[in-house]
Image: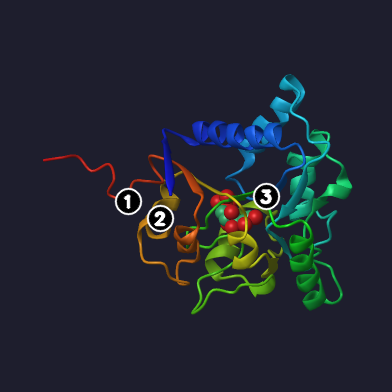
Amino acid sequence: MKLICVSNEEEMSLEASRLIAALVRIKPDAVLGLATGSTPLGTYEELVRMHGEENLDFSRVRTVNLDEYIGLDGNHPQSYRAFMNGYLFDRVNISPANTFVPNGMAEDLERECLEYDQLLEQLNFTDLQLLGIGSNGHIAFNEPDDYFTAHCHCVDLTHETIEANRRFFAEGEDVPTRAITMGMRGIMSSRRLLLLASGKKKAEAVAAACFGPVSPRVPGSIIQLHHEVTVIADLDALSKTGLFEEAD
Ligand code: F6R
């Protein structure tokens, strides 16, 4: 595991966008595994800037997102499809047909999961998978459990995750309680994992995921088994790792 320690969220985003941009320049038809949530916002902002000012070309890039809420249409402002369109896809020269997000409104959700896994296989998985981490250690929406789930699946979100997601919704609006998520096979089959974390709220999850035992109780800990993983985290997110304790 390569750990890049940065001083704040802004630096995290700059480092992450540089890595992603380098991949896109080296491999213009790269398959990027993308995440939503607050964590990658600065990274997407910087990629949009690079597209506008430095000719970063997305015309041949394909993207596969980690997850989507069940019951939200892609036009719903809080859907992950709308998130990706708004923060990245509509602002760069990517072809909409090359962007994939699970369909949370699919009539047959089991089939949707199966087809999402098939899509990943057809794309030969991702060249890079961007990951955030939940404060309970989840990656994508693989919530703490007794076992790791390999395949794309429907999941009941934990109370903690629902509450964490509430900040994106209007007051009184129902927060979705279920999601479709890429499973661990899809994530771990990526050629490179890039996990980002910033802020004290992530400190326990980061310490457990990066340095604790590999366990489905901390789903993010599975990244320790990947051969090419980069973690970019700020000092607050690394504050429980024991890496920066002052010597006596
Ligand atoms: C989102 C995703 C989630 C988030 C995690 C952290 O696509 O896969 O695992 O990365 O919930 O969310 P934020 O970044 O909002 O703290």
Q: How dense is the environment of label 3, judged by Cα within 10 Å: few (below 14), some, or many (20 and up)?
A: many
Dividing the image into four equal quarters, which quarter contains ligand 1?
A: bottom right
Q: Which residue is mark 1?
A: 241
Compute the Cα span from label 2 to label 3.
20 Å
Instruction: Please tell me the numbered disc located at residue 123.
Output: none
Q: Residue furthest left?
A: 248
Q: Earlier in the sequence, mark 2 or mark 3?
A: 3
Q: How dense is the environment of label 2, judged by Cα within 10 Å: few (below 14), some, or many (20 and up)?
A: some
Taking 67 as reference, is 188 left or right?
Answer: left
Residue drawn 45% across and 44% down? 199
Compute the Cα span from label 3 to label 1.
26 Å
Count of numbered tags = 3
- What is the x, y in percent for residue 64? 74, 53
Q: Which residue is mark 3?
A: 34
- What is the x, y in percent for residue 237? 41, 46
Q: Which residue is mark 2?
A: 210
Q: Would you place residue 188 above or below residue 85 in this image? A: below
